[in-house]
């Protein structure tokens, strides 16, 4: 009787975990190498974390600086404007991030301090200012990984504690749909929000949402009703184990995951990070997929890159932040660079 009970228990436990054999394995053996970038700007006194381009203007979000956003002329490499003094005042910013959008070419910022979605507006005389684009909907406050389209806002709640991966907010009906992770772990974890942290890309025209996960080597494809269409894994060991003592993912032996994304009309680009804490080594890749999650291209960075990147499909370039150690000044420096994707 005990043996029968043990067998049933094991079957139950297995059913509560994901069988990743039903995830399609993506072949990364034909990955191209990205090297010899063009250096656009160098910083040894600021910490850039996000980049965005509109026409000839390069917008950079900084941390550890007096102002949050700097604007440069990409042709002259000269700064033309600083916006968003750091603070908690009526017009101050704290930790803004660019809102991703396939069908909206405005420079929009997710800024929880103001409880607004903010636009960097350029006047006819060339001057720029921050102004409210739309109020922040109460039901999604506060969020990250924010995507905006004509009828939807998609992102991830920062203060979620129940393990939801992302939400789909209908701007017309004001209804919100929260989507759970499609698999469960075989052990309890203490922080579901951290464990299932995700990066999200929306394309309303394609009726698709692509979700990558920070600590899991896979991406999910959803429709706008929150139904999962497909899941792709990029290594056999795509789901880390859980440390029974700490109730956290056992990442000390290494892991891979997706930490940033960028949507375009035809494609989704995702930044994949493979970390090996024991060897103190990190590898970064750029994965290009269609909106059904099928891989189109994969690229490996030789350099250490980070932050929100920007894709210029007309010029076939990726703009990203590279950090390195400058022996001449004996300090860490951050460069905004571009790599050719042709």
Image (tube, rainbow, N blue to C red):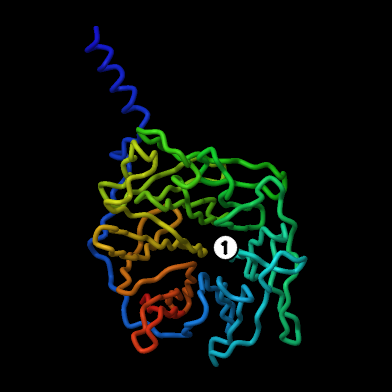
Name the spot of residue 23 as percent of width and height, x first.
33, 43
Q: Residues within 10 Å of mark 1 (few under 14, many from 20)?
A: many
| x and y percentages locating residue 297 in the rendered image | 34, 65
Percent x, y for residue 237? 27, 46
Q: Quadrant of the C terminus?
A: bottom left
Q: Nearer the viewer, residue 40 or 53?
A: 40
The residue depicted at 64 percent of the width and 47 percent of the height is: 169
Residue 37 x %, y %: 37, 82
Q: Is residue 187 above or below residue 268?
A: above
Residue that sits furthest to the top in the current view = 1
Q: Residue at x 68, y 42 (%)?
A: 175
- Residue 138 left/right relative to 211: right
Quarter holding residue 284: bottom left
Question: Residue extending furthest bottom?
Answer: 76
Write the residue at 63% across / 76% down. 66
In the picture of the structure, the residue carrying the numbered disc 1 is 100
Answer above or below: position of 76 versus 276. Answer: below
Q: Nearer the viewer, residue 60 or 280?
A: 280
27, above or below 8, in the image: below
Q: Residue at x 56, y 50 (%)?
A: 156
What is the tally of numbered marks visible in this picture?
Answer: 1
Task: Answer above or below: position of 69 versus 112.
Answer: below
Query: Residue 124 appears in which quarter of the rendering?
Result: bottom right
User: Where's the N terminus, which quadrant?
Assistant: top left
Q: Viewed as shown, does residue 281 lie left or right of 64?
A: left
Circle 1 — which element? Answer: loop
């Amino acid at each position: 009787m005990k043996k029968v009970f043990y067998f049933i228990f094991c079957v139950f436990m297995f059913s509560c975990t994901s069988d990743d054999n039903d995830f399609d394995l993506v072949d990364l053996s034909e990955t191209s190498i990205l090297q010899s970038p063009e250096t656009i700007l160098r910083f040894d006194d600021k910490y850039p974390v996000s980049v965005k381009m509109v026409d000839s203007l390069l917008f950079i979000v900084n941390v550890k600086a007096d102002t949050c956003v700097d604007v440069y002329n990409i042709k002259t490499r000269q700064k033309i404007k600083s916006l968003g003094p750091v603070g908690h005042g009526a017009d101050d910013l704290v930790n803004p991030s660019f809102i991703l959008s396939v069908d909206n070419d405005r420079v929009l910022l997710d800024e929880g301090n103001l409880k607004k979605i903010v636009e960097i507006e350029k006047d006819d005389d060339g001057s720029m200012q921050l102004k409210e684009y739309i109020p922040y909907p109460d039901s999604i406050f506060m969020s990250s990984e924010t995507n905006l389209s004509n009828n939807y806002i998609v992102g991830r709640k920062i203060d979620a504690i129940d393990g939801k991966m992302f939400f789909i907010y209908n701007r017309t009906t004001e209804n919100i749909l929260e989507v759970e992770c499609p698999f469960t772990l075989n052990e309890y974890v203490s922080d579901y929000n951290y464990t299932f942290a995700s990066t999200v890309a929306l394309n309303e025209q394609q009726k698709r949402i692509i979700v990558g996960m920070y600590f899991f080597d896979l991406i999910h494809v959803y429709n706008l009703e929150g139904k999962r269409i497909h899941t792709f894994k990029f290594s056999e060991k795509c789901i880390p184990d859980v440390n029974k003592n700490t109730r956290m993912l056992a990442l000390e032996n290494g892991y891979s995951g997706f930490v940033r994304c960028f949507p375009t009309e035809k494609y989704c680009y995702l930044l994949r990070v493979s970390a090996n804490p024991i060897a103190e080594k990190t590898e970064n890749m750029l994965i290009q997929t269609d909106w059904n999650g099928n891989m189109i291209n994969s690229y490996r960075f030789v350099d250490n890159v980070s932050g929100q990147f920007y894709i210029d499909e007309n010029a076939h370039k990726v703009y990203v932040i590279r950090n390195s150690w400058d022996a001449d000044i004996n300090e860490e420096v951050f460069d905004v660079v571009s790599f050719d994707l042709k």
